[in-house]
Amino acid sequence: MVTEFALAGFLMAVGLSLAGAGTHLYQWLSSQPAALRYDGRTVLHMAGHLAMSFICGPYIMLQLGWQQEEGGTVLLSSALLAALVAFGWAFLTGLLAVGVYLALVS
């Protein structure tokens, strides 16, 4: 049972690392902040934004959970909900990345 938890933690770590690196790379190359969106001028722009939202989504969700309210406070419920969604999403992203890596190596 410990190995399954370790594997799940590893997949979340891979997904979150990929999301963070992808977010910063996207922001560096496009000179605009990364956001969860699917709009675009053309179909290719729309597909690119959708792919970026899927890969970078966990990191963006964690950033959204830490937004401050009027008094400079962070709502605990907002931070916990964003973390729950982000780490679940990071698990799926990590599972996809490790699965593609193992398919290419094997």
Image: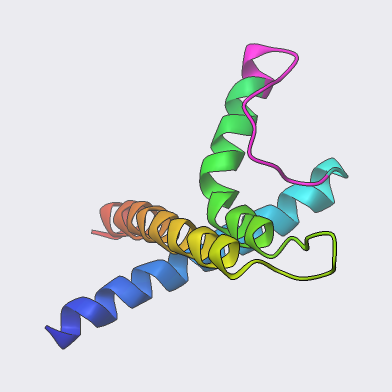
Q: Is residue 98 left or right of residue 49?
A: left
Relative to 100, is 3 above or below?
below
Give the extent of the magenta segment.
33-45
Q: Residue at x 68, y 60 (%)?
A: 63
Any magenta on residue 38? Answer: yes
How has the structure been colored for display? rainbow
Please state, as top left, top right, bottom left or bottom right, where the C terminus lies in the image: bottom left
Relative to 100, is 6 above or below?
below
Please state, as top left, top right, bottom left or bottom right, where the N terminus lies in the image: bottom left
Residue 17, position as x, y percentages in the image: 55, 68
Magenta segment main secondary structure: loop
Q: Residue at x 69, y 65 (%)?
A: 66
Q: Residue furthest right?
A: 31
Q: Is residue 34 left or right of residue 100?
A: right
Compare residues 77 and 30 and report the one nearer the observer.
77
Q: Residue at x 77, y 71 (%)?
A: 73
Q: Residue furthest front?
A: 71
Residue 67, position as x, y percentages in the image: 74, 60
Q: Residue furthest bottom?
A: 2
